[in-house]
Structures are given as structure tokens and as C-alpha cells.
Image (tube, rainbow, N blue to C red):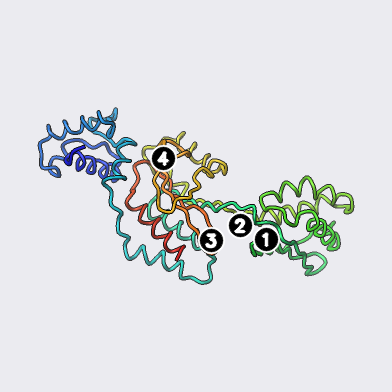
Amino acid sequence: MNDRQKKLLKEIVEAYIKDARPVGSKILTDKMKVSSATIRNEMSELEELGYLEKTHISSGRVPSSKGYKYYVENIMKPKELSEKDMYKLTTIFSNTNLSLNDAIKECMEIITDLTNYTSIVLGKESDNNTLKQLNIIPIDDHKVVALVVVSNGHVENKQVILPENVNVDEVVKASEIINKQLIGTPISEVSSKMEFEVKPRIAQIIKEYESVYSMFRNVFSDFAEKNSNYFYNGISNMLKQPEFEKDKIQNIIEKLEDYEMVKKIESNDDGVSIYIGEDNEFDKDVTVVKTSYKADGEEGTLAIIGPQRMEYDKVVTLLNFIKSQIER
């Protein structure tokens, strides 16, 4: 690709990212300082090389996946972060009342608003995080506090109002069985072991075992939800992308709600990596920009998902900045 073709590809990519409209030769002549005929010839050659595609609705061209890749790898320069956006993000990490996970989630929510794409935080799964202790603290005859302690030191408490047919002693007995059966169990396996190993034991000694079992199942379910290693924001932004039809949007949303599918986004890259179209395992019609983070014993993946017509320079800058704040 010669220098003029590189400049032409840059103009077409950036114009299409901005307006989502096929780019014709007329709007490029002033910027390129050459005739429309020359522009059309160069566009035809770029199309033959696979960097541009012709649409059915106009004579203009749009970038192909190959064109976006070339732009990202050879032309694009990261965009400078504005002082206003930088202040918003650094303020969150300066808040000592927030845990690292909460700070990350709040920052990714801001990035979602700044980009109009979908953001994802995918924590690293670890079999080392196991149930260490379940404690029941009676408050009165009808109320207890359940404390769930995990091997990594995390503690979650939940106040529970007991069903009328259940007394505190039965709840304490059930907690003793759970501790005996489940201490040392990976958190990811607690739910299944509750069903198949703990429930039959509780049924042997407690009359109203269904109510007691349901109570503890809810406690662990709430714990898992609050400490989920998967968080996404801005799913409705998919509706704002003009290139996505209704069926495509529904398909992407279903994939975002499928944890096994989202796990394919997990990253071990030190820097920010860009996976366009078929280069990502999530969906061939989107781009996934992602990086890994590691700090204070926490590690995981930060990702932005959007159309291939993405503001790559802005997204890369934002992810690099968040990664640096986390690791600082």
C-alpha cells in the first residue's frame, strides 16, 4: 500500500466511524487534494486488495475487517484523554471507601457512557477461593445473621427473617452440617453440593428441612451474585449501532448473558489487544478490545465490545488508563 492509499484508508475509516455512512469520492477530494477520478481508482484498488467493501445502497465504500485491522496496526494513534474524563476516573480510584472491584465496575460504567459501547469485567476464576466458614448469629427467635467467610478473607453477611415454621436451633444445626460437609469446597461448587450432599443430611434431622434448605440456598445465591466474577454494562448500547439489525442485537445479547460464551473473552495480554471480526471468538460482527489487570490479589479482564466501526483510538486510551490506575 502506497502513502496515498494509506492516507485514503485513514480518511475512509475515520469518516465511517464518525457517521456510519458509506464514503464516496466527492467528500475526499478536498482532503486528498486530488481529483475524484484518482480517488475512485485508488478506492477500487483498495477494494481489490480487500481493505474496502462496496455497499449495495450507494456507490461509497466502507472499511472491511481487513481494512480496520490495517488501520489499527499501521495508522491509528491513541487519542489523548481529556482532563474532564481523566478527573472522573481518577476520583473513583481515590475513594478509599470503595473496594478495588467496586472501583473497577464504576470506572467501566463511565467508559460505557463515554464510548456508547458495552463494557465487561471478567474476574479470574480461582479454585483456591473456597468456603472457609459459615456462622449463624441469632438476633432473636425469628431473626439471624448469616456470615459467609471465604478463604481469600472476604466476608459477607446477610440478615435473615426465619419462616414461621422454623426455629433458630434448627438453623444452627443446619449450619453445622454445612460446615462439616462444605468447608474447603471451591465457591463455584457450593450450590451443587448443597443440593446433592447437604440437603439429604438436613432432611434426616430437621422436620421443616425444605424451608431451612431454601434459606441457606438463598444466602449462598446472594453471596455468589454480589461477588460474581462477571459484570457487564451498557448492553442497551447495542441498540444504538445502525449496522446491527434486530436479530443480530438479540443474538449478541444472548451471548453476553451466556457465561461460558463470555469466558472466551478472558485475556492474559499485558497490553491492550484488539480482536476484529473473526479474530475474536465471541462474535464475527463485533470488535473486542481487551486487557488483563492484576492488583491486590485480584486479577481479571477488562473488555469493550462494539461494532467493527469502533472509535479504536479512544477505547485503547481509556483501557490503558484504567489498567494503569488499577495497577498503581
Query: SS of the residue at dot 4?
Result: strand
Q: Nearer the viewer, mark 1 or mark 3?
A: 1
Q: Residues within 10 Å of mark 3 (few under 14, many from 20)?
A: some
Q: Where the N terminus falls, by quadrant?
A: top left
Q: CA distance from mark 4 to mark 3?
A: 26 Å
User: In this image, 43 relative to 255: left or right?
Assistant: left
Among numbered discs 1 and 3, the one appearing first in the sequence: 3
Disc 4 marks which amino acid? Answer: Val
> Is the C-beta separation of discs 2 and 4 under 8 Å?
no
Q: CA distance from mark 2 to mark 3?
A: 9 Å
Disc 3 marks which amino acid? Answer: Asn
Q: CA distance from mark 2 to mark 4?
A: 28 Å
**Residue placed under numbered mark 2 in the picture:** 227
Residue 308, by quadrant, is: top left
Above or below, 44 against 281 in this view is above
User: In this image, 268 relative to 65: left or right?
Assistant: right
User: Which circle marks residue 286 in the picture?
Assistant: 4
Q: Residues within 10 Å of mark 1 (few under 14, many from 20)?
A: many
Is 261 or 145 nearer to us in this picture? 261
Q: Residue at x 34, y 65 (%)?
A: 84
Q: Residue at x 50, y 59 (%)?
A: 294
Residue 42, by quadrant, is: top left
Q: CA distance from mark 1 to mark 3?
A: 16 Å
Where residue 118 appears, x then y in whole percent?
44, 48
Q: Residue at x 56, y 62 (%)?
A: 297
User: Which circle marks residue 150 in the picture?
Assistant: 1
Q: Nearer the viewer, mark 1 or mark 4?
A: 1
User: Which circle marks residue 275 in the picture?
Assistant: none
User: In this image, 129 relative to 232: left or right?
Assistant: right
**Residue placed under numbered mark 3 in the picture:** 101
